[in-house]
Image (spheres, rainbow, N blue to C red):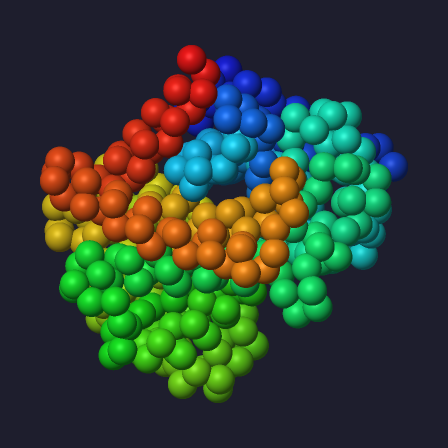
Amino acid sequence: MNIFTHPEFDHHEQVVFCHDPATDLRAIIAIHDTALGPAAGGCRMHPYATEEDALTDVLRLSRGMSYKNAIAGLPLGGGKCVIIADPRRPDKAEVLRAFSRHVQTLGGRFWTAIDVGVGPEDADVLAEECDYIFARASQFPAGVTASQFTALGAFTALRAGAAHVWDRTDLVGLRVAVQGLGGTGRELSRLLYEAGAELVVADVSPDAVAAVVEAYGAMAVDPEVIHSQDVDVFAPCALGAVINDATVGEISARLVSGIANNQLAAPEHGRILREHGITVVPDFLANAGGVMAAATMIYSDPTLESSRETVLTLFDRVRAVLAQADREDRTTTEVAEEIAEERMAAARS
């Protein structure tokens, strides 16, 4: 496995491979940039097919966290970690504790939290032996999680995208295809439904689909064709690289705005969408709500209302990026990354 010449390495400051013989823990921590502060990013537990796949994912995700935290105006750098395991394994708690001890050895250089396969209660398990865990269930009132703020941020970003594309702030009658109905995808679906949008949904879990169809009158389609539906907005809320060589030409929505990380398999897919008149809200901006609300716990004592107000600032941030991209005839991702890089460069200097 080659690290320094890996196509996603991008000058990462530190990559840590973690192992625990007792639990067969295999995990990777990637710290991309700490110019703005300690690196912060979620802990993902997923049964990657290969260690190379896990490395590629954690490198891409940690770089995205640098951009996300920077453009969100947070005094935090970017990092991410992945545990190569099925989150349904019966000894999950022991695996999490073993991993948390590795995070503890970094002494606060890296803070981690919830992500795919690691929920708020799991974050409390991580915190049993580690001081550098945020977005824990115990840090929120009953019934409130960081995922709800992620969905609120995604909803706010989608509204900003609609204001840019159609010059409207309401979503009444807009058809939105939601790909992925995990906790954040379901919550985004609820917010969209309450705002008057019409939903087309897909997920690999029939139960998740059935629940959203029943609750919000959504139309269900096969996950393989959700991206190509006749809708106004495509909201990817599952895993990454859903916009790729095979799918990019099949998207007819005028706006792409969703929660998933790394939605574009490659930068050229963003350029293709732009050439086709499709506006893309950069994923690391659209899904920044969770970290904007929860990561403030690292350096302050926020209230729920202040966290909500912080997340709602995404509306103006998204609109500014989309407007600049149009003025300069560039992709929205290029513009957003440039803004983030300028902030990190200023901190280094």
Residue shown at 39% from the left, 52% from the top:
313
Relative to 321, does residue 159 appear above or below in the rendering? below
Which quadrant of the figure has residue 255?
Answer: bottom left
Residue shown at 54% from the left, 54% from the top:
307
Left-right relation of 62 to 233 = right
Residue shown at 63% from the left, 65% from the top:
144
Q: Position of residue 287 (x, y in %)?
A: 44, 51
Which quadrant of the figure has residue 333?
Answer: top left
Relative to 190, does residue 273 appear above or below in the rendering? above
Relative to 3, does residue 169 appear above or below in the rendering? below
Left-right relation of 309 to 325 = right
Can you say which quadrant of the picture contains the C terminus? top left
Q: Residue furthest top?
A: 349
Can you say which quadrant of the picture contains the N terminus? top right
The residue nearer to you, when weighing 162 against 8, is: 162
Q: Position of residue 105 (x, y in %)?
A: 77, 25
Q: Position of residue 11 (x, y in %)?
A: 47, 18
Residue shown at 31% from the left, 70% from the top:
176
Which quadrant of the figure has residue 183?
Answer: bottom right
Left-right relation of 343 to 49 = left
In this orientation, does residue 160 appear?
yes
Q: Position of residue 10 (x, y in %)?
A: 43, 22
The residue nearer to you, when weighing 97 against 128, is: 128
The residue nearer to you, when weighing 202 against 115, is: 115
Report the number of discs: 0
Q: Residue furthest right?
A: 22
In this orientation, does residue 54 appear?
no
Left-right relation of 100 to 15 = right
